[in-house]
Amino acid sequence: MSTATESQQPATPSDQVDDVTRTRPRVSVKTAVVYALAALVTIVAWVLNTPADVRTNFQFGSGTDLFRIPNAPVPSLVTLVVLVLVMVAGLVLAVLRYRQRRPVPGWVHVVVGVAFVLAFLTYVGAGKSTVIPMVSLLAGALALSVPLVFGAMSGVICERSGIINIAIEGQLLFGAFAAAVVASAAGSGYVGLLAAPVAGAMVGAALAWFSVSFRVNQIIVGVVLNTLIIGLTGFLFATLLSDNKALWNTRMPLPRLPIPGLSQIPVIGPVLFNQTILIYLMYVIVVLLQFMLFRSRWGLRTRAVGEHPRAADTVGIKVNPRRVWNTILGGAVAGLGGAFFTVGSGLAFGREMSAGQGYIALAAMILGKWNPKGAVAAALLFGFSKNLGNVLSTIGSGVPSEILLMLPYVITIFAVAGFVGRVRPPAAEGTPYTKS
Amino acid sequence: MKLELQGITKVFGSLVANDHIDLVVEPGEIHALLGENGAGKSTLMNVLYGLYDPDDGQILVDGRPVRFKGPGDAVAAGIGMVHQHFMLVPVFTVAESVALGYEPAGPGGVLRLDEARRRVREISDRFGFQVDPDAVVEDLPVGVQQRVEIIKALSRDAHVLILDEPTAVLTPQETDELIRIMGELKDAGTSIVFITHKLREVRAVADRITVIRRGKVVGEASPTSTETELASLMVGRAVSLTVDKDPADPGEAAFQVKDLSVVADNGTVLVDDISFDVRAGEILCIAGVQGNGQTELAEVILGLEEADAGTMTLDGEDLLGRSVKKRLRAGVGFVPEDRSTDGVVSSFSIAENLVLDLYDTAPFARGLSMSPAKVAANAEQRTEEFDVRHTSVQDPISTLSGGNAQKVVLAREMSRPLRLLVASQPTRGLDVGSIEFVHKRMVAERDRGTPVIIVSTELDEVMALADRIAVMYRGRIVGVLDAVDEDGHPVNRDVLGLMMAGVPLDEAQRQASEHMSALAMADLDGDGIPDALQQGGEEQE
């Protein structure tokens, strides 16, 4: 390699022969701007509107704790100022990172986000006699996230292998239906839990069949399947299920199985470890999928098929069968998640009870950048903001709950528009594979 | 391992892609398969690699007939293939790419990536590849990606390695490195089937040469044959490898580019502060390896890409900021790089494609309506003039061969009064006859006094057409030089090659004089006179 100092050709000859691709990295200033906005909103809207002498009453305990954390009324204004300082610290870090052209680490987002939410709660509860029920807020958030997590995992499995799974909605709904009906007929929630993934897998199989064998546009097939399942379950609900409610649509709740020891940890215990088997299965699926996708033969081949199917074919990987099986597997996972609507929540089946959660699950998957752990974080965020809306409408706050209910969707639109950094789907997603 | 193909026949519809092809690859030889684009080389290799099922004929490995149901069978039989378009997953690491399909795994299918890394390092060290197993494929230069492909094949114990047009994407220096690697593999006992249409490379590396034309083996040649002999065998008639043209008679600098930059959305600098001008009546070739900003430069001239900085004037008028339509009307002719997606609308008829630029002006349009008769008449005239072989001008353009479709593009772009012609890879994928035609047209446009810019990655084309050559590397112009120096000597290929790897002009000249590339060495074979100087007097009789 030459240093080429003697060249007269272009202006700066010395970096002609460098081996690093020359880019002017455009590290986003957005992070710092968002942090600054969060701090500003907190100061203007909440700090300035909170009297100095009031307190906010957070409730952290629940009945079964190993030891009780007393309800500690904290001075609202002091708490808010501390939280603002946390956000400002995050802002300073973000600005420093921006000037160094390095991205902000993920945990900073979490810290600033939590500080912002706590600040909001502190403001809402300031001077009120009602407590802010932290445990039920978090537990409810988890519950609302469950179908989203299952759906997003289904989406990850399918899309990583190159099939767009819009039919998550239908898979959730059919899973909910099958779980309710089978559980009711068999008299056991657990039997219903076995039926749900089978139902979801059937929808997945239909999706795979049309998109692989007939190369139909996958989005269209998915939407059609969703409509079909809504119609089918709606029809059966109005006829079969209504005719003999006792036999076909009796509530069969899954029992809660508190994990000894873990479930008694304050706050975390009741939220995470006093749940039904379905939630424990969810934990297992998320961890397993994260591991398998990036550390196993199955995962490597699945990703290869979704990114560059022809390359996979040339090393003897059977592209289309793998896509079919993964889509069926994804359907089964979403179907299992659907069981949460019925046996998982102790409810009977109701018409269209999945209520668009399948689409939100897809959004969570995109926001999570097609990664299981990212998708879970996104699903939890959606679940939390939804539950926050619910809780606040009971506490009574100045903010209309509809605004809060909008929040996840607003976040999604920004996320999908590329606001959270480079979002890159699997390259061969949605493209049918043919040999030649 | 000895590999034999006997009577291989493969038919696609009415097209006989391979017609009773026989081929024998001896152990440890480099066997070149030479043929034009579309001669059936790749089809044959896909048959051999198990991707296509032959309609007739058989494959023998060490004398035993075998049947490949898929690439897996071919790999198991010891055949490895490096495809022209690499079969690597861009987001995988090198170790993952090499392991894919043959993953070392523990219980439960858990990958043993350390084992995969070790394999990559072992092969990489043995042949001096210098490949990092943890690098992500898409971050690697193409030359290194190709080595990853070779590692992939070798890690599966390939005894026969098929290289499909391996030099198409390489710099001349990378080609040199590949030739060295091929030599080492051969010494280690690996047979190599080398598919190409480039005559110089064949002569530099091959032990034996089989020539294919229109799906048939038309003969064998020895590596000592001259390029002209090989070319006439490949094409089936005497061809001239040089373009007949008079010295340029350039006028004023008509098209001027100053401090032009193009930055992609992700911040990558595609065109980096370049300045040049083109005089009326001269051909400026932009040379360089694919992906060094030439595509973007061509597109920014027409306005398909936005400039982030700089100025661009044609006969004194500023072009930047004008719409594509206005630039076309100002007399810019543009032959895009990818003819099938950017050059024509494939479902439209030949006649419609010929008026894509002028459909809304007289005589083709009157008010809101178009005049089909005028469009058809125009098409008849243009196809005649540009020798487009077709059955009806109302047929969709997708029914035409690549060469004829390109002629339609030229006919459209050159039928306006031009003040600047920009052609990006105008002969890519064409047969020799069409290439000659395109080249003649380009020179004719030059002789009419139009400034012409040709972007090409083929050094042969650059040397044949250019009056001046600008070499681009990573978005910058490394240097501009005359195609023929004051003494009448053509520019040294090795100098251009080094410049394509980013070495500045005078440094390149110094290095080229000290060390001759393998290809340049091959040119000297036998008589010590470079072929470029011989060809003039050596037309086939």
Image (spheres, coloured by chain):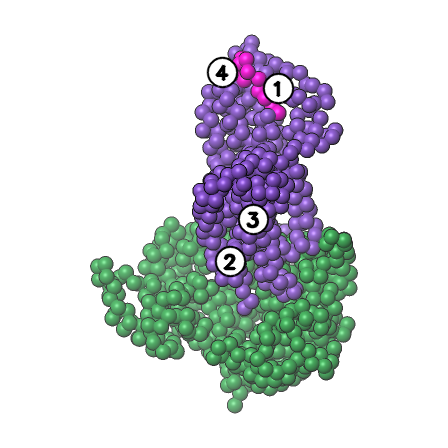
Chain colours: A purple, B green
Which amino acid, mark 4?
A: Asn
Query: What span is in magenta?
Result: A125-135
Which amino acid, mark 3?
A: Gly
Secondary structure beneath dot 1 equals strand
**In the figure, is residue B167 to the left or right of B484?**
right
- Residue holding disc 3: A200
| Badges 2 and 3, same chain | yes
Could you tell me residue A330's position as x and y percent? Answer: 59, 50
Indicate which label's residue lies in the foreground, 2 or 3: 3
Q: Quick one: label 4, few (<14), some, or many (20+) residues within 10 Å?
A: few
Quarter that holds the N terminus of chain B: bottom right
- Labelled pair 2, 3 in contact (Cβ < 8 Å): no
Q: Quick one: label 3, few (<14), some, or many (20+) residues within 10 Å?
A: many
Image mark 4: chain: A
Query: Residue farthest to the top?
Result: A53
Q: Earlier in the sequence, mark 1 or mark 2?
A: 1
Could you tell me residue B354's position as x and y percent? Answer: 34, 68
- Residue holding disc 4: A49
Which label was assigned to residue A211?
A: 2
Q: Quick one: label 2, few (<14), some, or many (20+) residues within 10 Å?
A: many
